[in-house]
Image (cartoon, helix red, strand yellow):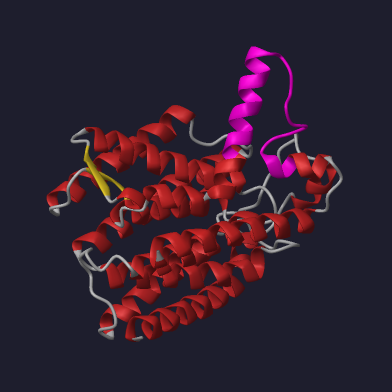
Amino acid sequence: MFVLTKSLLALMIGFIISVVMGYFMIPLLKKLNVSQRVSVFVGASHKKKNGIPTVGGLIFIIPTFITILIMYFTNKIEINSNLLIVLFVFVAYAILGFTDDFMKLKRKQNEGLTEIQKLFGQVLIAIVFFFIYMKSGSEPLFWIHAFDLKIDVGWLYGFFILFMLVASSNAVNITDGLDGLAGGLSFIATLVLGIITWNTDWLAGYQDIAIFCFILAGSLLGFLVYNTYPAKVFMGDTGSLAIGGVLASIAILTRHELTFAVIMGVFVIETLSVIIQVFSLFVFKKKVFLMTPLHHNFEKLGWKEQDIVKLFWICGLILGTIAVVYGAWL
């Protein structure tokens, strides 16, 4: 009950600081002309989004760290090696995303870092993650909870960590295409991971990581005040890469990689739609979808943006509930 109380307190503080920061930061971003440039390939309804501030990920990233400091100095949270891994990934991916956003703004187009540059950054982060992870005494195990099966994969676990981080961060980035879509799904995923982390009492510092999840969830909720339709700010790569990376790191630490695939189910489907479309065009010279990612396909079918977001949120909530039942109850 004490952990629950601290988690709810953390969520509330993160939410309040995020809302306050958004109130002051959005006008500043507008003044600095840190604005979104909409792709020429999206529908006409998106053209009105030109000029909306981006790099809004700072609205939930900065409050998350402020809340952690508040909780730390009031002795409500402890900084341990596992939490440091989480914070490192969060910051590292935020910096990588911010660099990409900055390059786009500087060039005044939707081309920031090259795919090779992004991949190099992600590989570097994964290597550091793996080094700290192994130094903290963790074992390179792939754990299938349903059968209580633990498989020691040795140094190959480093490649698995790389895949998790790259896939998760890119999946959130791909999904970030409609007002509130990625933010809402990320809020659900973070909340679910926080609940599951409560149940990993064998992990050193599990309570602190759970509290971090609730802090981030609260900050994301505050961000959604400004990001839901009609959006006043976008998270940009700064936010999407940071969220994807940190959620994957928590799933790895808590040994819930397979459960994580369920939690991130909507993100996975969005990513698969892009892969299927590219494969079909390359091999068969035909489209499977009218447009990808999948949310744009629904737009082409005439769905309203708000209705698509609501549907995807509901799907994310259902998958998240299934993950909680399996990961924290059964």
Q: Quadrant of residue 77?
A: bottom left
Height in image: 15 above or below 199? below
Height in image: 273 above or below 327? above
Query: For the image shown, how many numbered marks are present on the structure?
Result: 0
**Whole-percent x and y of residue 35?**
65, 52
Left or right: 241, with 269 as reference point: left
Q: Residue at x 41, y 47 (%)?
A: 258
Left or right: 133, with 240 as reference point: left
**Whole-percent x and y of residue 115?**
48, 30
Looking at the image, which residue sits at the far right? 302
Q: Residue at x 24, y 32 (%)?
A: 156
Give the dominant element type of the magenta stretch: helix, strand or loop.
Answer: helix
Residue 290 located within the stretch drawn in magenta: yes
What segment carries the magenta color? Answer: 271-296
- Looking at this view, is 143 or 203 the one in front? 143
Q: Quadrant of residue 38?
A: top right
Left or right: 167, with 105 as reference point: left
Q: Quadrant of the C terminus?
A: bottom left
**Whole-percent x and y of residue 204?**
20, 65
Q: Can residue 95 be seen?
A: no
Height in image: 166 above or below 324? above
- Looking at this view, is 276 or 68 the one in front? 276
Q: Quadrant of the N terminus?
A: bottom left
Q: Can residue 290 be seen?
A: yes
Q: Residue at x 50, y 54 (%)?
A: 263
Residue 205 located within the stretch drawn in magenta: no
**Whole-percent x and y of residue 125?**
31, 43
